[in-house]
């Protein structure tokens, strides 16, 4: 049986969302946590966007150092040759790319306004793909933006052109969240049959079905003997009504009755890291996790009404499909209610050394400590919220890369 692989797009689709954003340190921590969770790939950002370049290169350096065990770091850009050239000029070490172009008539007419025809779209994608491969991309996913409103025949033509020119996957983007599970299942089977090319499902939640359509599409691809990659975001954060939620997808693949023995998630995904990842991401974005969020919401394992509480107390399986421990919950959390020393943007050396001593990280002398303190001050300047213990540890472990990702040079003329 073929596998499902997860590509998390929080650091690209998540951060491009209105009103919500992440510091470069937070994006990096998310990459670290995704790797700890055994996720296949992180769409880490925009290599053509100036303020992303140092962050991306710092993360590529961390990958070189072996910081990421399984995670592929991938950049996103438009499927036009100029963007690919700029990507490799900015980030020469980048190995994985997803390149995107609109394929539906409504977008070709509405966005390009007569400047591009369907043939031009195909040509641009193929040329961009060739440039990416010639400049050293190991994998290239080719994205059909607004695939759900594109004729199936055109999607097949697009996927085949990508396959013939060396692409590695075809990303089906349900950009407006317009698909329903049965339609997408049939459509993906048709595309899979005709192209025999691995598929990526990228689905939005405008109709509240992002996870359902992603899984239905994936099942169609798997039934046709193809690997399928599902795009997710942490806590479902994303454009408008959000994207397909990472934890929901993993839980569905493990516990939905219909998927057992039919659809297989790649080995090595550790769902027990879900709680930490979801909580950190909520903190970093400054958005609460909804009370009813799958697996990680405050009420995911709460019971109050008479019949439910009684049933859950007698046997938790009466009212719980899976256990809190499955998603890494269940440990009590300690809260400091007395004196506390913190460090950050305006911190000094004594407090800083005390905080790191408590973390078990000791510096040889004040000079060494001061160098890390300066990074902590800058990191906190970027995050504008108390640095977490993991962030503080990460800064001390990888000072050169942290220094790089915190640096942004601006030229204003
Ligand atoms: Zn999207």
Image: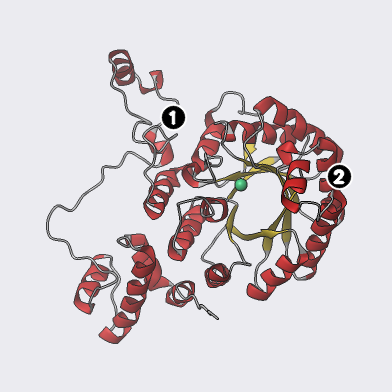
Q: How is the image coloured?
A: secondary structure
Relative to residue 121, is residue 253 drawn left or right? left
Eyeballing the image, is 199 above or below 401?
Answer: above
Nearest to the observer: residue 205 or residue 211: 205
Q: Where residue 174 sits in the image (x, y, percent)?
A: 66, 39
Compared across the picture, whether 242 is left or right of 373 comes to: right
Determine the residue positioned at 71% across, 37% down.
Answer: 148
Rendering coords of residue 61 (x, y %): 55, 72
Q: Residues within 10 Å of mark 2 (few under 14, many from 20)?
A: some
- The residue where tag 2 is placed is 157
Q: CA distance from mark 2 to mark 1?
A: 42 Å
| Residue 25: % across, % down | 44, 65
Labelled disc at residue 322: 1
At horizontal 48% and vertical 60% (from top left) the residue drawn is 27
Outermost residue to the top: 307
Q: In the image, is residue 403 above or below residue 367?
A: above
């Amino acid at each position: 049986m073929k596998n499902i692989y997860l590509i998390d797009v929080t650091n690209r689709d998540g951060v491009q969302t209105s009103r919500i954003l992440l510091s470069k340190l937070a994006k990096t921590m998310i990459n670290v946590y995704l790797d700890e969770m055994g996720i296949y790939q992180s769409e880490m950002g925009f290599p053509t966007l100036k303020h992303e370049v140092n962050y991306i290169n710092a993360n590529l350096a961390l990958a070189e150092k072996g910081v990421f065990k399984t995670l592929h770091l991938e950049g996103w850009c438009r499927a036009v040759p100029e963007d690919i050239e700029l990507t490799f000029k900015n980030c020469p070490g980048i190995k994985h790319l997803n390149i995107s172009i609109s394929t539906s008539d409504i977008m070709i007419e509405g966005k390009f306004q007569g400047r591009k025809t369907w043939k031009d779209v195909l040509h641009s994608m193929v040329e961009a793909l060739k440039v990416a491969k010639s400049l050293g991309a190991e994998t290239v996913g080719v994205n059909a933006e607004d695939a759900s409103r594109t004729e199936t025949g055109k999607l097949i033509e697009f996927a085949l052109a990508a396959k013939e020119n060396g692409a590695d996957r075809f990303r089906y983007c349900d950009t407006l969240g317009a698909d329903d599970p049965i339609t997408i299942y049939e459509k993906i089977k048709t595309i899979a049959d005709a192209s025999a090319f691995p598929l990526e499902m990228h689905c939005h939640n405008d109709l509240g079905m992002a996870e359902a359509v992603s899984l239905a599409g994936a099942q169609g691809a798997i039934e046709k003997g193809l690997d399928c990659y599902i795009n997710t975001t942490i806590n479902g954060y994303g454009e408008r009504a959000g994207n397909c939620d990472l934890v929901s997808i993993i839980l569905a693949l493990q516990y939905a009755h219909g998927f057992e023995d039919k659809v297989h998630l790649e080995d090595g995904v550790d769902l027990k890291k879900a709680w930490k990842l979801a909580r950190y991401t909520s903190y970093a974005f400054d958005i609460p996790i909804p009370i009813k969020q799958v697996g990680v919401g405050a009420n995911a394992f709460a019971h109050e009404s008479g019949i439910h509480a009684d049933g859950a107390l007698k046997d938790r399986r009466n009212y719980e499909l899976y256990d809190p421990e499955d998603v890494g919950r269940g440990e009590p959390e300690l809260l400091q209610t007395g004196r506390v020393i913190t460090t950050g943007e305006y911190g000094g050396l004594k407090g800083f050394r005390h905080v790191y001593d408590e973390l078990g990280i000791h510096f040889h002398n004040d000079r060494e400590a001061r160098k890390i303190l300066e990074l902590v001050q800058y990191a906190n300047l970027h995050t504008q919220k108390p640095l977490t213990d993991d962030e503080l540890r990460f800064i001390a472990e990888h000072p050169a890369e942290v220094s790089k990702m915190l640096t942004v040079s601006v030229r204003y003329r």
